[in-house]
């Protein structure tokens, strides 16, 4: 019986001004285990952050069906167990992560597996936010064009950029139910030309700061004048949390995706920064958790057995 376990990292995207363009893969993962069922019965289970039966419309299952459809084969009866360590719905690309994992897991059940490039193309078609899929797929620092999302017909382009030094980040996630719906409504339909120009310049600086580990460069370049001012009022204690992190030596703090997850970039004092951020959220009446994470430079990891 063939069995595969696929592990995919969280996607920290929209770093500072890099909305829908810059992403770092973080060392927090979701996994999909998939195997051909011995008979007609099948197992579908979800563990970790959410425990219970796996819904039929779960992104990993939808992706698996699309993979078999693209291969012109019927989806076989399969045992599927999904384990979630990534907090759902907080801006860490969990839906894209599940999609990527489901595609690669299903591909390993095929007699003639598809090439990685074909699976990547399917992932980009299925994911609403390609930057999340690219980041989760390839790991490290990913740069993705937003052209395909603009509706002008331009192709999506992306590159994985090698980091010249290892990075660790502090991830803080406040407990704010129904945040995503509110954040989406806060997005502007149009922005001023001068705001766009200033933001574009900072995107290049952030990418260079991340690539080289230049925290002095990141300190100013991480400034987000487009998204953060509109989302900030939706996160109680936001200003105090950022100030607490900077008070412990952080170079900067950025929303991950639409939030409410906040990611802090710092060279030292990650333990103190994590505690300070959680305490600042608690002072604002919001429960929060924090992780100290490395940047995942591998992306998709596959462990297949027969």
Image: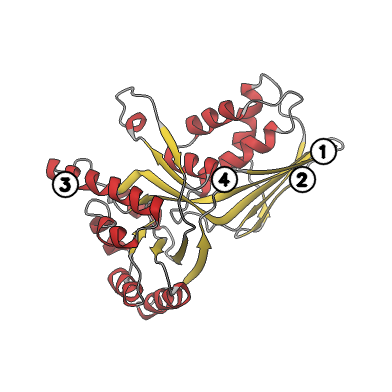
Position of residue 152 in the picture relative to residue 165 (left or right): left
Mark 2 vs mark 4, CA separation in Å: 27 Å
Looking at the picture, does residue 22 appear above or below residue 223? above
Q: Residue at x 70, y 26 (%)?
A: 113
- Mark number, residue 299: 4
- Binning the other alpha carbons within 10 Å of mark 4 as few (below 14), some (14 to 19) or many (20 upward) gives many
Q: Which residue is drawn at 39% across and 29% down?
A: 156
Residue 259, given in percent of the width and then of the height, sits at 39, 57
- The residue wearing badge 2 is 43
User: Is the Cβ of the residue at disc 2 closer than 8 Å to that at disc 4?
Assistant: no
Mark 3 vs mark 1, CA separation in Å: 55 Å
Mark 3 vs mark 2, CA separation in Å: 51 Å
Q: Is residue 129 visible?
A: no
Q: Residue at x 54, y 49 (%)?
A: 297
Determine the secondary structure under disc 2: loop
User: Is the Cβ of the residue at disc 3 closer than 8 Å to that at disc 2?
Assistant: no
Mark 1 vs mark 2, CA separation in Å: 8 Å
- The residue wearing badge 3 is 195
Q: Which residue is drawn at 64% across and 34% down?
A: 64
């Amino acid at each position: 019986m063939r069995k595969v376990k696929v592990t995919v990292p969280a996607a920290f995207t929209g770093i500072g001004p890099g909305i829908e363009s810059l992403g770092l893969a973080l060392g927090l993962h979701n996994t999909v285990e998939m195997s051909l069922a011995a008979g007609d019965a099948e197992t579908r289970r979800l563990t970790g952050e959410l425990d219970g039966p796996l819904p039929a419309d779960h992104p990993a299952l939808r992706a698996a069906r699309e993979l078999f459809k693209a291969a012109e084969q019927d989806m076989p009866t399969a045992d599927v167990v999904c384990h979630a360590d990534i907090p759902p719905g907080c801006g860490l690309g969990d839906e894209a992560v599940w999609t990527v994992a489901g595609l690669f897991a299903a591909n390993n059940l095929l007699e003639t597996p598809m090439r990685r490039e074909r699976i990547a193309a399917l992932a980009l078609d299925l994911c609403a936010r390609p930057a999340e899929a690219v980041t989760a797929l390839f790991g490290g620092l990913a740069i993705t064009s937003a052209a395909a999302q603009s509706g002008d017909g331009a192709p999506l382009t992306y590159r994985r950029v090698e980091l010249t030094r290892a990075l660790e980040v502090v991830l803080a996630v406040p407990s704010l139910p129904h945040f995503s719906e509110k954040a989406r409504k806060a997005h502007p339909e149009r922005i001023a030309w001068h705001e766009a120009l200033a933001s574009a310049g900072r995107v290049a600086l952030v990418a260079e700061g991340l690539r080289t580990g230049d925290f002095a460069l990141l300190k100013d370049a991480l400034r987000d004048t487009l998204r953060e001012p509109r989302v900030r009022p939706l996160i109680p204690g936001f200003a105090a949390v950022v100030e607490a992190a900077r008070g412990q030596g952080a170079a900067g703090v950025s929303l991950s995706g639409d939030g409410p997850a906040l990611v802090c970039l710092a060279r030292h004092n990650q333990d103190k920064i994590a505690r300070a951020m959680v305490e600042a959220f608690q002072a604002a009446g919001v429960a929060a958790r924090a992780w100290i994470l490395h940047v995942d430079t591998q992306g998709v990891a596959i462990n297949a057995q027969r």
